[in-house]
Image (spheres, rainbow, N blue to C red):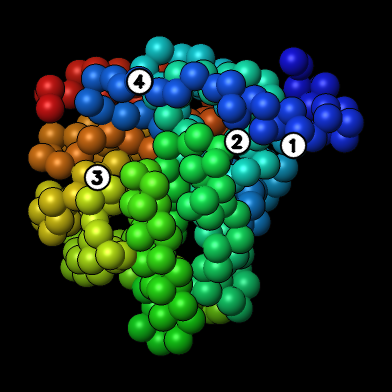
Amino acid sequence: MRISELAETRALRPEAVATAAAARARWSGGSGRLLLVAADQPARGTLGVDGDPVAMADRGELLERLCVALERPGVDGVLGTPDVIEDLLLLGVLDGKVVIGSMNRGGLAGTSFEIDDRFTAYDADAIAASRLDGGKMLLRIDDSDPATARTLEGCAHAVTALAAHRLTALVEPYVSHHVEGHARNLLSPQAMIRAVSVASGLGATSAYTWLGLPVVAEVERVVAATTLPVLLLGGDASGDPGPALDGWRRALRTPGVRGIVAGRSLLYPRDGDVRAAVDAAAELLRAAEPL
């Protein structure tokens, strides 16, 4: 199926989504490290890359970039909201891939309720029914915003529900604060250690919990705050993958780090070469010391 045919399929044969999900060949394991491509930013209203506020707005272009990335050697899978995952299922490009469903996208970027990250996308039952491999959630802790308590509770319930299905919960934790009405993440080692400590204790069990963490100064101290598996984030919207590659190269030496999950830095590189950006990240994982 071509991307141009997706709209017609969605209009006339919506049941094709469930059929494609049921027929998908599941991931059977890999080298021990993971490289995942993230595409859940649009659902939170975050479309900008490298100064272009709507760089990710064209869904056909986003899907084409995802298809290019997913066909590259060393790419293990994708992370996305239901609309994106279902498009990729209909395109038939997720066989044998890790597929992580994004769960809480309700804290829209730049809004007064940004910290109140309601679960507006996948829930654990839907992830299990769609035969996905896990769910991702964003946890931002703002000491001055009472909505943090609701987000903590929602993430805890999601971790517990995913574990009941024996599915991975990927938690991305931050300590945040408000700057001129917008939520900003604190990326000091101390702030990230606090965020990791809180996230590690969410839910009735941590047996299936992984953490997605940015590469910050003294990342070794941050990762040492937990025994949970860690994926390194690469959410830089500058369009320049160079700084992300340098940070990943350093952080991949840290015990407990299992791989990379990155979106715009790989899908929208400044030079437009998605293949080269993805291949460079995959080469870092191949060159890393065996786990």
Which residue in the protein does label 4 denote? 28
Residue 38, position as x, y percentages in the image: 49, 39
**Percent x, y for residue 241?**
42, 33
Q: Label 1: state its secondary structure.
A: loop
Quadrant for the N terminus in the image: top right
The kind of residue tagged 2 is Ile
Along the polypeptide, which appears first: circle 4 or circle 2? 4
Against 86, residue 188 (above or below) is below
- Packing grade of label 1 (10 A; few <14, some 14-19, many >=20) is few
Q: Position of residue 182 (x, y in %)?
A: 54, 73
Residue type of the residue flagged with mark 3: Val
For disc 3, the marked residue is 230
Residue in the image at 67% along x and 27% along y: 19
Instruction: Work out whether residue 53 or residue 46 is closer to the camera in this orientation and state it.
Output: 46
Of the numbered discs 4 and 3, the one sitting upstream in the chain is: 4
Instruction: Indicate the position of residue 36 as horizontal and vertical percent values.
Output: 41, 32
Amino acid at pointer 1: Asp
